[in-house]
Image (cartoon, grey):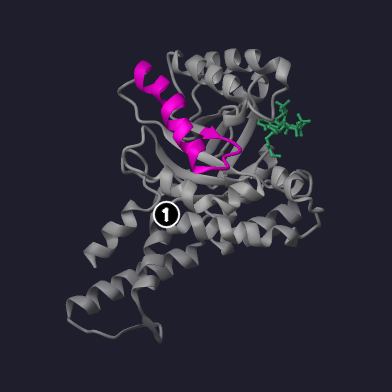
Amino acid sequence: FICGLNVLSRRYASTDGSFHPRRSLLYIPGNDERKIKKASSLNADIVVLDCEDGVALNRKKEAREVISNVLNTTSFGSSEVAVRINSVDAEKLALEDMNTFMQSLTIPTTLLVPKVEHARHLEWINDKIFPVAKTLKPEVKLKLIIFVESALGLLNLREILEAGVDETNLFNLEAVVFGSDDFFANIGATRTHDAKELMFARQSIVIHCKAFGLQAIDMVHIDFKDLDRLKEESIEGARMGFTGKQVIHPNQIDIVNEAFSPSPEKIEWARELVAAFEQQSSEGIGAITFRGQMIDMPLVKQAFNVLTMAKATKSK
Ligand code: 1VU
C-alpha cells in the first residue's frame, strides 16, 4: 500500500515535491499593468503573464519591462506566477524574453512555452532557453508547462513528453496545455457550441499526460460572457480527466475552480475508502469491499488523488 502511495505522490509533483493545483490558469496580456495588478486580488491558481499571443509584436518589449517590474513589486498571494514566452519558432523573441526575466530581481518560477511540435523543440528549450536560467539563477530549477496547438504537436506528443520528463533536463516538466484555438485553425475545423470536433484531441491529451504523470489543462472558453456553457464545459473537462482549464476573464475563475475541485461528498467517499482499505489490508483480508463494491488499487489511487487535490486547495 505504502508503495502505491509513493507512486501516487510522485504524480503531478513539483520540483520541491509538493503538489501545485492548477485548476484555473488565467492569462493576462503582459503589457497590461492594470489587469496584472488586479490579478493579485483574484483567486486563480496560476496567473500567466503573457508575452506571446496576448501581446502585439510592437508591444513585446514593453510587455517584458512591465512584467519584470511587476514581478519585483507585486505579490500575487497564493497564486503561482508564470510567464508565457514566445514560441520556439520565434527563437529571437523567446530568447529576449528569457534574458529579460532571468535578470529580474524576482524571477517567475514557471515558464509556459507555446506551440511545441517536436521532441527536438524540447531539446532546444533545454539547450537554449534554460541555460540562461541556469547561468543567471543557478539555485532555481524552473517548472515548465508546454502547449500542444497543432495536429503535428498532438501526433508527436508521446516523443515530446518522453524528452520532457528526462531527469537530466534543466527544467521540471509539469503540465500540458491544450491550445484549442490554434488547433482549430491548424486542422481546419469549425467551432460548434459543444466543441465535439475537439473531443479526440482532448482525450488524447489527457491520456498522454496521465501516462507521463503530468497535469492536463483544458481548452479556453473564449465566449467569456457565457458562464453557463463555461460551467458545463468545465465539468465535462474535469470528468474527462483534465486537472484544470485556461481562463481569460476574472468572472471565469470561480466556476472553473469549483468544477475542478472534489465535492465534499467525493472527499468523504475518498477518506472512507482509504481508511477501509488500510484497515482491511492490515487484517490480511485479500478481497476488500467498500459500500458494497470491491475495491482495487486503481480505485484507491483515485481516492488518494481526490484527497491530494482536496488538501492542496483547502486554503484557497
Ligand atoms: O474593473 P476593473 O477595470 O478594475 O477591471 C476590469 C478588467 O481590467 C479586469 N480584467 C482582468 N483582470 C485580470 N486578468 C484578466 N485577464 C482580465 N480581464 C479583465 O476585470 C474587470 C472587468 O473586465 P471587463 O469585463 O470590463 O473586461 P475587459 O473589456 O476589460 O476585458 C475583456 C478581455 C477579453 C479583453 C480581457 O478579459 C482580456 O484581456 N483577457 C485576456 C486575453 C488574453 O490574454 N488572450 C490571450 C491568451 S488566450 C489564448 O491564447 C487562447 C485563445
Residue 156 lies left or right of residue 63; in this view the side is left
Q: Position of residue 115 (x, y in %)?
A: 61, 38
Instruction: Indicate whether residue 281 is drawn in magenta.
Output: no
Residue 245 lies left or right of residue 207; in this view the side is right
What is the chief secondary structure element of the magenta stretch? helix
Q: Which residues are magenta?
A: 112-136
Relative to 216, say whether 296 is above or below.
Answer: below
Q: Position of residue 197 (x, y in %)?
A: 74, 60
As drawn, which residue projects farthest toward the front?
120
In which quadrant of the rendered view does residue 126 lie? top left
In which quadrant of the rendered view does residue 93 lie? top right
- The N terminus sits in image quarter: bottom left
As rendered, which of 157 and 139 lies closer to the eye? Answer: 157
Q: Residue at x 47, y 66 (%)?
A: 266
Relative to 139, say whether 78 is above or below.
Answer: below
Relative to 80, say whether 117 is above or below.
Answer: below
Q: Determine the quadrant in which ligand 1 lies.
A: top right
Disc 1 designates what residue? 212
As rendered, which of 269 and 124 lies closer to the eye? Answer: 124
Query: Could one spot residue 87 in this view of the protein?
Result: no
Q: Residue at x 60, y 27 (%)?
A: 86
Residue 192 lies left or right of residue 284; in this view the side is right
Q: Residue at x 59, y 61 (%)?
A: 203
The 10 Å Cα crowd at callout 1, few under 14, some 14 to 19, many 20 or more, is some
Q: Position of residue 168 (x, y in %)?
A: 31, 38
Q: Amino acid at mark 1?
A: Phe
- Is the shortest distance between ligand 1 and the CB of mark 1 under 8 Å? no
As drawn, which residue projects farthest toward the left?
283
Q: Position of residue 208 (x, y in %)?
A: 50, 57
Query: Could one spot residue 114 in this view of the protein?
Result: yes
Residue 114 lies left or right of residue 266; in this view the side is right
